[in-house]
């Protein structure tokens, strides 16, 4: 059969489109493979990825430093009622010329000074309590940073899994529409099809290629996010995670856990405690202060060639009478800060409760979406198979096949997204109740905590032991 020139040109254009599609798919396959195979073929579970994120992420390290920094304020405040002892030594050479005669003398003194506040109306005690409360705030910020890092790492992990599966599905879709273009062209060549059917198949092929390229772009973004939070490229990831009973069994249990465990609520309560201590310190500033000061001087303390020793002990009582309004303003400010901290605690509790309800319903909705999508996938697969058979016997058109395939692809994508959303919602629920931590998840890592550091700064004789006495 002689094929007209216009038809040969039309078919050659379709062949060029198919060749370009194949090149795009080969390039995209290399990108998609990065989600499973990095520098090695070793599989990386979500637990391993979370452990890597916990160990390497700088956000957690920075939050740990903040706790240690806050702990130093405890030692600084405690020093307010502890003795301060210092040693002094001075040498002096004196000379004079009077009436043509010159005289000179020299002295060398060694002394000790002791100073301690005996009573300050409990102001230092309130400041120490405030410093301890701020340390708790910093410790809860560390927990919050840990939760945020682990949640972001889990999201990145599941996003890579989702986008990889979507790329694979869309690649299959491109292959299917390529076959439909070829089938439509063959039917046209033997006179059983029309150019409209070929154009329809070609349009669906172009649309599937665009969706495939969009999937590749999304996968590359997810891989970059994975690199950021986990610390290396994704390698042979696998869907699923064993929560080992960490998830709450009911919404009421989740809300109860959040009230007692979430770092945002505990941090807000510690902030209230710090504000109360700050108000007590501001009130104590109106009271008297009693200081003990002692000095002792040895060797040539009296000058001249003689040697001796002198010393003194004195008590100093100070009672503030007027400070230009500074103390009153400080007290009012401290009281306002206390009120504000209590209101902030209520806001934090409401926000956490809202996030718990949202995460719980997100998890429930994901389960429903998965069930619905699975049913839709089974039905759409049967519809597609039936429409293809009907097209083969002339009871359906190519457009019917294309529509059935597009519907099947759509519900498959919904199923993939719902499965990823379910796991993301589960981790969001853990985070909202305050259980998303390396300890709760049983990660194989060394737990980062500043508790030992806080205990060390409470040691009042740390300065003495740090002196090189040997």
Image (tube, rainbow, N blue to C red):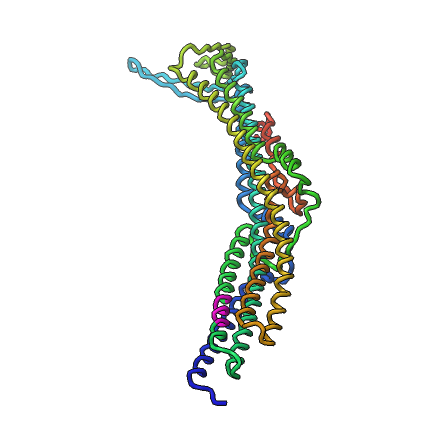
Q: Quadrant of residue 39?
A: bottom right
Q: Is residue 407 above or below residue 426?
A: below
Residue with the most extreme bottom position = 1
Asked whether the viewer can see residue 71, the reply is: no
Q: Is residue 84 above or below residue 159?
A: above
Viewer-proximal residue among 438 and 174: 174
Residue with the most extreme front position = 395
Q: Residue at x 51, y 68 (%)?
A: 27
x and y percentages locating residue 116 in the rendered image:
53, 17
Q: Quadrant of the C terminus?
A: top right
Asked whether the viewer can see residue 143, the reply is: yes
Viewer-proximal residue among 267 and 159: 159
Q: Is residue 249 above or below residue 275?
A: below
x and y percentages locating residue 459 in the rendered image:
60, 27
Q: What predominant SS class does the magenta segment belong to? A: helix
Q: Residue at x 57, y 50 (%)?
A: 155
x and y percentages locating residue 186 in the rendered image:
53, 80
Q: Quadrant of residue 101?
A: top left
Viewer-proximal residue among 228 and 303: 228
Magenta residue check for 140 = no
Q: Residue at x 42, y 83 (%)?
A: 6
**Number of numbered discs overlaid on the protein picture:** 0
Q: Which residues are magenta?
A: 200-208
């Amino acid at each position: 059969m002689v094929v007209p020139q216009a038809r040969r040109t039309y078919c050659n254009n379709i062949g060029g489109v198919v060749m370009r599609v194949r090149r795009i798919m080969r390039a995209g396959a290399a990108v998609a493979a990065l989600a499973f195979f990095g520098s090695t073929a070793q599989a990386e579970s979500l637990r391993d990825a979370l452990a890597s994120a916990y160990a390497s992420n700088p956000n957690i390290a920075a939050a740990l430093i903040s706790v240690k920094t806050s702990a130093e304020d405890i030692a600084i405040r405690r020093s307010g009622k502890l003795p301060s002892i210092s040693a002094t030594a001075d040498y002096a050479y004196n000379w004079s010329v009077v009436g043509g005669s010159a005289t000179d003398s020299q002295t060398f003194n060694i002394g000790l000074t002791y100073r301690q506040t005996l009573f300050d109306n409990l102001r230092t005690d309130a400041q120490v309590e405030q410093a301890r409360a701020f340390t708790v705030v910093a410790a809860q910020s560390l927990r919050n940073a840990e939760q945020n890092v682990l949640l972001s790492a889990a999201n990145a992990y599941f996003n890579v899994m989702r986008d990889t599966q979507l790329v694979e599905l869309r690649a299959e879709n491109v292959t299917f529409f390529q076959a439909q273009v070829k089938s439509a062209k063959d039917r046209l060549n033997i006179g059983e099809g029309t150019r409209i059917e070929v154009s329809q198949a070609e349009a669906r092929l172009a649309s599937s290629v665009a969706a495939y390229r969009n999937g590749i772009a999304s996968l590359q973004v997810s891989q970059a996010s994975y690199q950021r939070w986990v610390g290396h490229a994704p390698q042979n990831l696998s869907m699923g995670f064993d929560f080992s009973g960490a998830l709450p069994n009911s919404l009421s249990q989740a809300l109860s856990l959040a009230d007692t465990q979430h770092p945002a609520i505990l941090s807000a309560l510690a902030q209230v405690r710090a504000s109360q201590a700050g108000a007590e310190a501001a009130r104590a500033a109106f009271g008297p202060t009693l200081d003990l000061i002692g000095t002792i001087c040895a060797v040539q303390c009296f000058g001249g060639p003689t040697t001796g020793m002198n010393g003194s002990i004195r008590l100093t009582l100070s009672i503030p009478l007027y400070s230009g309004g500074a103390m009153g303003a400080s007290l009012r400010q401290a009281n306002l800060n206390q009120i504000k901290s209590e209101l902030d605690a209520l806001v934090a509790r409401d926000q956490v409760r809202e996030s718990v309800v949202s995460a719980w319903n997100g998890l429930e909705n994901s389960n429903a979406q998965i069930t619905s999508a699975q049913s839709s996938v089974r039905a759409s697969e049967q519809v597609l198979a039936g429409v293809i058979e009907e097209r083969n016997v002339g009871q359906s058109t190519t457009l019917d096949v294309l529509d059935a395939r597009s519907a099947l692809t759509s519900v498959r994508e919904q199923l993939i997204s719902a499965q990823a959303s379910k796991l993301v919602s589960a981790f969001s629920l853990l985070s909202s109740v305050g259980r998303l931590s390396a300890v709760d998840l049983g990660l194989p890592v060394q737990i980062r905590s500043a508790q030992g550091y806080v205990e060390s700064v409470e040691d009042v004789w740390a300065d003495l032991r740090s002196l090189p006495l040997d």
